[in-house]
Image: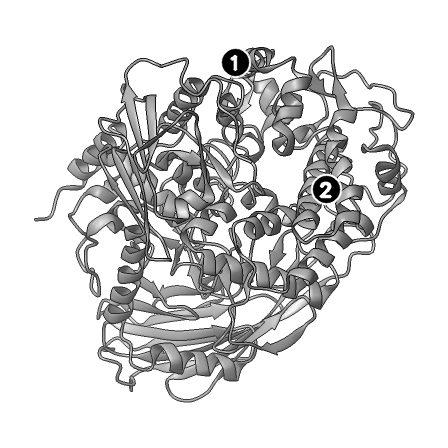
Amino acid sequence: MKKKPVLCALAALFLYACGISPADNTDLPSGITGYAAPSGAAKYIDPTIGNVAPFLVPTYPTIHLTNQMMRMFPVKDDYISDQIERFPFLVTSHRDKGPCGIQVISGEITEPSWEQKMNIDHDLEVIHPWFYSTYLIDEEIRVSFTPGKKSAIYQFNFPPAKRQNLLIQGSDEFRCAVLDASSFALEEKILHTPKGPNAMPRTMSFYVYGMIVGSNNPALKRVEIQSDDRKLVISFPKSGTSPVFLKYAVSYVSLEQARLNFQNELADQDFAKLAGTGQEEWSKVCSRIEVEGGTEAQKRTFYSALYRTSERMVDINEYGTYYSGYDGNVHKSTRPFYVDDWIWDTYLALHPLRTILYPEMENDMLNSYTLMYEQSGWMPTFPQVYGNHQCMNAYHSSAIFVDGYRKGLKNYDVEKAYEGIRKNLTQGSFIPWRQGTPRTTLDDFFHKHGYFPSLHPGEAEKTAAVDDFEKRQPVAVTLGVSYDFWALAQFAKALGKTEDYAEFFPKGKNYKNLWHPDIRLFMPKDHKGKWIYIDPKADGGPGYRHFYDENNGWTYAWDVKQDIAGLTELLGGKKSAEERLDQLFREPLGMKKKEFVLDGSNSTGMVGQFSMGNEPSFHIPYLYNYFGAPWKTQQRTRFLLDVWFKDNIFGIPGDEDGGGMTAFVVFSSIGIYPVTPGLPFYSITSPLFEKVTLHLENGKKFTVIAKGAGKVKKYIQRAFINGTEIDGPFITHDQIMSGCTLELELSELPDKAWGANAKTPE
């Protein structure tokens, strides 16, 4: 039954007010074909959650199969916009709007047609990870999309009265050709210009092989394909057949490889079958973690977060062949080659999550990193399809290797990986956004004195390699690189490299060089070793980059994941550390919000001085487990999930970063979190659900039972692993992977003694 527009709008407002997305409504717009309503846990995935950001970058409704090369979202200014610029053939990297794309235009084509946007109605969209559909209001055309691994199908439902056109164009480096009456080829060169002095632009090619077909895959006779080498027009006369399908495959290797990808994936596929296959795959993803209890909203948030964690990294191996942007060559391999990672974000929770859920995939990712090092000479930090993107600070690829190795992931050239990590930290620059470039005098200073020196406010920068906007970030760099040296030392110890361990382990303590005992924060020092007295809440310019990075001194006060015992000692013991952590969550901004936003725009989702919307904060609420007050971890994590991760378009508090943030949601909802990547154990908190079952790759099950878990009942009274009582909030990786059951007895009121004297696992 069709509903009146006014009633639909009122219903949508009511649903949002209740914290429920209109995607929950089972009524579909008319004209949808090739679609099957989701069932099971997959019905809880809503790609629009977080599509409107509190301040910075939103999530995107990315349509893709798990960790696969083919990704798509309609190119718009933002979610609020009701105009689509184009439908891309491929999103090459997370948040990227992709190379060439498609416009759908009715009637005769004029020069302005190539700049024309397509108007939509948000309420007529249908969005799932495996299926996207929207209605173009002015053109009266429904456009639908479903992805394969290296291929996809667009479906166009045209009205019969007008001539219909698909306009395809790209950048200045775009070329196209008509192959026959129903097929075409596209090539576009992707240009990337990295930051920094003497940075060399890099280019690579992107290929598309496409075909226009009718229902059940017959070649269309009434179609016109025209090309002038720079633009492609596909036209259908007024009496043309509807629906029409654009089937295509992509490649980074060659046009011939795109043809092969087409044959491998689409030769016997139609739209409905491909969409059904995609839905089955996402159902398998969701069935990997089964939950019982909780609210419908919590399930939508949880499974949508799980969907986000499956966007990256992506496998660009094209059936035994892949192009590497790290040496510009095509390689033969039967093993996946993964790219598109932002290690500054993802080492914290996303990579550790995969070591549990998909250890074989994580092994392949570590192997891919190792190959990138072999091919380029540097271990990457932000590996993209075109090569390493120099971004953020530190070399946290060290963390994912030592974390994986200590959790049993060793199916790659371990010695070569160690060599690459060691080279990064001993020969590479620590200047932000300059990873993979040789050491400078600033780096020599760090190696000699154990900290990165700051400039005084107003002092001119004399080191040419320092970026004008990103600055030195000296406190953040010192803390981040200290962690990396700790990770390198742990890797050396595991590999029996005793001399390296002896050399690098002390560097993991370098964070102490910037601890100010009176201010009780990490503060900047100049090159003479003198303190620079700043306001650690507010000073440092945009993103506090003169001294910190994206977060202020109150966040970085806790960025010592590798030596929590040492941090506790600096803070004066467990009780003093607990009180200081309480203060973090209660400390006021100390300024008007509009003043805070001016420089602190990266710090979103604020609770006192704690920023839920930025990655360096994720482990902080779990530190109570180390300070003798686990009940406060249980209180804080539940509160943070409830306040900042809603199941609607506003439901992500900061830059989600392709799984970097939502992995925190998945872990915390289950009731565990990897505070220190590189140590094979997890902190325990109060789960959202009464029962969580993880189906592991080894055929075993890790189960968390928390009867009666709810908004009020959240405090742990007793805990058991396989029926044996434990006295503290920690569980080891081996216990999880052995298929144990973690059972938690909960109550409305905290047991402040439980876990207060617990020791961390060795």
The residue at which mark 1 appears reads as: 582
Which labelled disc corresponds to residue 219? none
Tell me where residue 175 appears, x and y as whole percent.
57, 76
Q: How many marks?
A: 2
Q: Is residue 610 above or below residue 22?
A: above
Q: Is residue 405 visible to us here?
A: yes
Q: Would residue 102 appear left or right of 41 to someone viewing this image?
A: right
Quadrant into which the C terminus falls: top right
Q: Quadrant of residue 668?
A: top left
Residue 362 in the figure: left or right of residue 234: right
Q: Residue at x 62, y 77 (%)?
A: 330
Q: Which residue is mark 2?
A: 485
**Who is closer to the viewer here, 670 or 173?**
670
Residue at x-position 43% and y-position 74%: 249
The image shows residue 54, relative to residue 30, as above or below, that is: above
Q: Is residue 237 left or right of residue 567?
A: left
For the point 22% across and 26% down, the residue is 708
Category of crowding for the residue at label 2, using alpha-carbon neighbours closer than 10 angstroms: few (below 14), some (14–19), many (at least 20): many
Amino acid type of the residue that numbered disc 2 sits on in the rendered structure:
Phe
Instruction: Name the residue at 29% across, 34% down.
Output: 723
- Could you tell me if residue 142 is visible in this image? no
In this image, 135 relative to 199: left or right? Answer: left
Most foreground residue, 589 or 661: 661
How far apart marks 2 and 1 lie (CA) works out to: 30 Å
Check disc 1 and give the amino acid type: Asp
Q: Nearer the viewer, residue 498 or 566?
A: 498
Q: Residue furthest bottom?
A: 180
On the image, which quarter does residue 338 sit in?
A: bottom right
SS category of the residue bearing label 1? helix
Q: Which x, y percent locates residue 539?
A: 71, 21
